[in-house]
Protein backbone atom coordinates (compact mmCIF):
# COMPACT_ATOMS: atom_id res chain seq x y z
CA UNK A 1 0.00 0.00 0.00
CA UNK A 2 2.85 2.37 0.85
CA UNK A 3 4.44 1.69 -2.53
CA UNK A 4 1.19 2.50 -4.31
CA UNK A 5 0.71 5.68 -2.28
CA UNK A 6 4.25 6.79 -3.15
CA UNK A 7 3.50 6.85 -6.87
CA UNK A 8 2.91 10.45 -7.84
CA UNK A 9 3.76 10.63 -11.55
CA UNK A 10 1.21 9.65 -14.15
CA UNK A 11 1.11 9.81 -17.93
CA UNK A 12 -2.47 11.06 -18.02
CA UNK A 13 -5.29 12.27 -15.83
CA UNK A 14 -7.10 9.00 -16.59
CA UNK A 15 -4.15 6.98 -15.28
CA UNK A 16 -4.09 9.11 -12.12
CA UNK A 17 -7.84 8.64 -11.64
CA UNK A 18 -7.44 4.86 -12.08
CA UNK A 19 -4.65 4.86 -9.51
CA UNK A 20 -6.74 6.80 -6.98
CA UNK A 21 -9.65 4.42 -7.62
CA UNK A 22 -7.39 1.44 -6.94
CA UNK A 23 -6.19 2.98 -3.67
CA UNK A 24 -9.81 3.57 -2.62
CA UNK A 25 -10.77 -0.04 -3.46
CA UNK A 26 -7.88 -1.42 -1.43
CA UNK A 27 -8.68 0.80 1.57
CA UNK A 28 -12.35 -0.23 1.40
CA UNK A 29 -11.38 -3.91 1.23
CA UNK A 30 -9.06 -3.56 4.23
CA UNK A 31 -11.88 -1.88 6.19
CA UNK A 32 -14.28 -4.68 5.30
CA UNK A 33 -11.78 -7.34 6.36
CA UNK A 34 -11.21 -5.55 9.67
CA UNK A 35 -14.97 -5.41 10.27
CA UNK A 36 -15.32 -9.13 9.50
CA UNK A 37 -12.42 -9.97 11.80
CA UNK A 38 -13.78 -7.80 14.63
CA UNK A 39 -17.19 -9.48 14.53
CA UNK A 40 -16.13 -13.00 13.55
CA UNK A 41 -17.83 -12.90 10.15
CA UNK A 42 -16.45 -15.53 7.78
CA UNK A 43 -17.30 -17.06 4.43
CA UNK A 44 -19.41 -19.58 6.36
CA UNK A 45 -21.54 -16.84 7.94
CA UNK A 46 -25.17 -16.59 6.89
CA UNK A 47 -26.04 -13.19 5.45
CA UNK A 48 -29.74 -12.56 4.84
CA UNK A 49 -31.57 -9.55 3.49
CA UNK A 50 -34.78 -8.65 5.28
CA UNK A 51 -37.72 -8.67 2.88
CA UNK A 52 -38.92 -5.34 1.55
CA UNK A 53 -42.09 -4.16 3.22
CA UNK A 54 -45.35 -2.94 1.74
CA UNK A 55 -45.09 0.44 3.43
CA UNK A 56 -42.15 2.48 4.72
CA UNK A 57 -43.85 2.64 8.15
CA UNK A 58 -43.38 -1.11 8.66
CA UNK A 59 -40.25 -2.17 10.56
CA UNK A 60 -38.61 -5.20 12.12
CA UNK A 61 -37.60 -5.49 15.77
CA UNK A 62 -35.35 -8.02 17.47
CA UNK A 63 -37.06 -9.80 20.34
CA UNK A 64 -36.14 -12.41 22.90
CA UNK A 65 -38.98 -14.92 22.79
CA UNK A 66 -38.49 -16.22 26.37
CA UNK A 67 -39.15 -19.71 25.00
CA UNK A 68 -42.74 -18.76 24.27
CA UNK A 69 -44.79 -18.62 21.08
CA UNK A 70 -47.03 -16.03 22.73
CA UNK A 71 -45.83 -12.59 21.62
CA UNK A 72 -47.07 -11.09 24.92
CA UNK A 73 -44.15 -12.88 26.62
CA UNK A 74 -41.54 -11.54 24.22
CA UNK A 75 -39.07 -8.84 25.23
CA UNK A 76 -37.50 -6.42 22.80
CA UNK A 77 -33.71 -6.66 22.58
CA UNK A 78 -31.99 -3.34 23.20
CA UNK A 79 -28.65 -2.49 21.60
CA UNK A 80 -26.47 -0.39 23.87
CA UNK A 81 -29.65 0.64 25.68
CA UNK A 82 -31.38 1.76 22.48
CA UNK A 83 -34.16 0.38 20.34
CA UNK A 84 -33.06 -0.53 16.85
CA UNK A 85 -35.60 -0.75 14.07
CA UNK A 86 -34.69 -2.61 10.91
CA UNK A 87 -36.23 -2.03 7.53
CA UNK A 88 -36.65 -4.01 4.34
CA UNK A 89 -33.30 -4.50 2.64
CA UNK A 90 -31.27 -4.38 5.87
CA UNK A 91 -28.82 -7.22 6.41
CA UNK A 92 -28.94 -9.80 9.17
CA UNK A 93 -25.68 -11.67 9.74
CA UNK A 94 -25.39 -14.94 11.61
CA UNK A 95 -21.81 -15.80 12.51
Image (cartoon, helix red, strand yellow):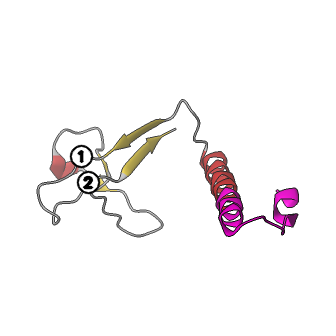
Magenta: predominant secondary structure element?
helix
The part of the chain drawn in magenta is 1-23
Location of mark 1 (residue): 51
At mark 1, the secondary structure is: loop
Towards the viewer: 72 or 53? 53
Q: Secondary structure at mark 2?
A: loop
State which quadrant residue 82 falls in.
bottom left
> How many residues crowd around disc 2 within 10 Å: few (fewer than 14), some, or many (20 or more)?
some
Residue at 26% x, 54% y is: 88
Residue 69 is left or right of residue 4, and the answer is left
For the point 25% across and 50% down, which residue is it?
74
Quick check: 77 left or right of 88? right
Q: Earlier in the sequence, mark 1 or mark 2?
A: 1
Which residue corresponds to the image point at 61% horizontal and 42% vertical from the top-left? 40
The residue that label 2 is drawn on is 88
Q: Which residue: 28% across, 56% down?
A: 61
Q: Position of residue 64 (x, y in %)?
A: 33, 48
Amino acid sequence: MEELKAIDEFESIEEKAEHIGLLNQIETAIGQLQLCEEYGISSGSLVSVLPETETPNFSYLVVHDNESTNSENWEEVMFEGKQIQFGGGDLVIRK
